[in-house]
Amino acid sequence: ETGVTQTPRHLVMGMTNKKSLKCEQHLGHNAMYWYKQSAKKPLELMFVYNFKEQTENNSVPSRFSPECPNSSHLFLHLHTLQPEDSALYLCASSQDQGQDYNEQFFGPGTRLTVL
Amino acid sequence: AQRVTQPEKLLSVFKGAPVELKCNYSYSGSPELFWYVQYSRQRLQLLLRHISRESIKGFTADLNKGETSFHLKKPFAQEEDSAMYYCALRRYGQNFVFGPGTRLSVLP
């Protein structure tokens, strides 16, 4: 598959569960991003990785733990989440975080529901 | 801090009518401005960027630094334009800041 893919597309989990979201990009990009999209808030940047190094943690609670083993893969590990963490989690990639006029390519998102 | 506002949560127009989606930003330097669009059941995708000064799907947007605005316009709306539109700002070499979005509904 081309572009940015995310799995699973839907996830329902209890507050005591541990789960992981996966993102893969097939564009040869070097920067990857996690965003949270809630019904009542603008798109919120969570984490940024540039050349596998984390360059941004936007004051995200520690119950969200990112991992970037290589430039093509990005994970978001989830544990002891709260119901207010229910949202659409979007992954995006771009050529390079610092490049001018750097278009971001988005995945379809994972719809997360925390019970 | 950078901030992007889109005053209208929902904008409804009739097919063939002109449409303008408003975007204002707060940033003291020279920003990069973008419009992203999300059609129903599709992923968020770039519509246009101010540096390109191009028209995409009949949409144009002009950066007005004096008014700190980047409004998106189309002279004749089509039903297939119905979607969620996000204005986004980026400082050179920095991350995106997205506005809250405006849902455009084009009525037949």
Image (spheres, coloured by chain):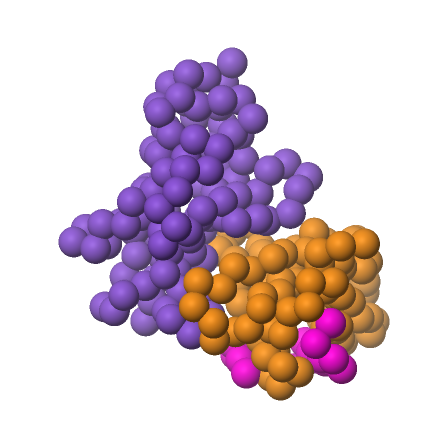
Tell me the residue at 66%/83% (across/down): A52
Tell me the residue at 49%/64% (across/down): A102
Magenta residues span: A55-72
Could you say which chain is coloured purple in the image? B
Residue B11 visible in image: no
- Residue A101 location (% of width, % of height): 44, 63
Location of residue A53 with respect to B84 vertically, above or below: below
User: Residue most toward the left?
Assistant: B66
- A64 part of magenta stretch: yes
- Residue A14 location (% of width, % of height): 81, 65
- B3 part of magenta stretch: no
Closer-to-camera residue (A94/A90): A94
- Residue B13 location (% of width, % of height): 41, 22
- Colour in which chain A is drawn: orange
Tell me the residue at 81%/54% (across/down): A1
Q: Is residue B90 left or right of residue B30?
A: right
Residue B75 visible in image: yes
Quarter of the figure with the N terminus of chain B:
bottom left
How many badges with numbers are in the image? Answer: 0
Q: Is residue B18 left or right of residue B82?
A: left
Location of residue A54 with respect to A13 vertically, above or below: below
User: Residue most toward the top?
Assistant: B108
Task: Determine the image quadrant of residue A111.
Answer: bottom right
Task: Determine the image quadrant of residue A55.
Answer: bottom right
Tell me the residue at 76%/59% (across/down): A6
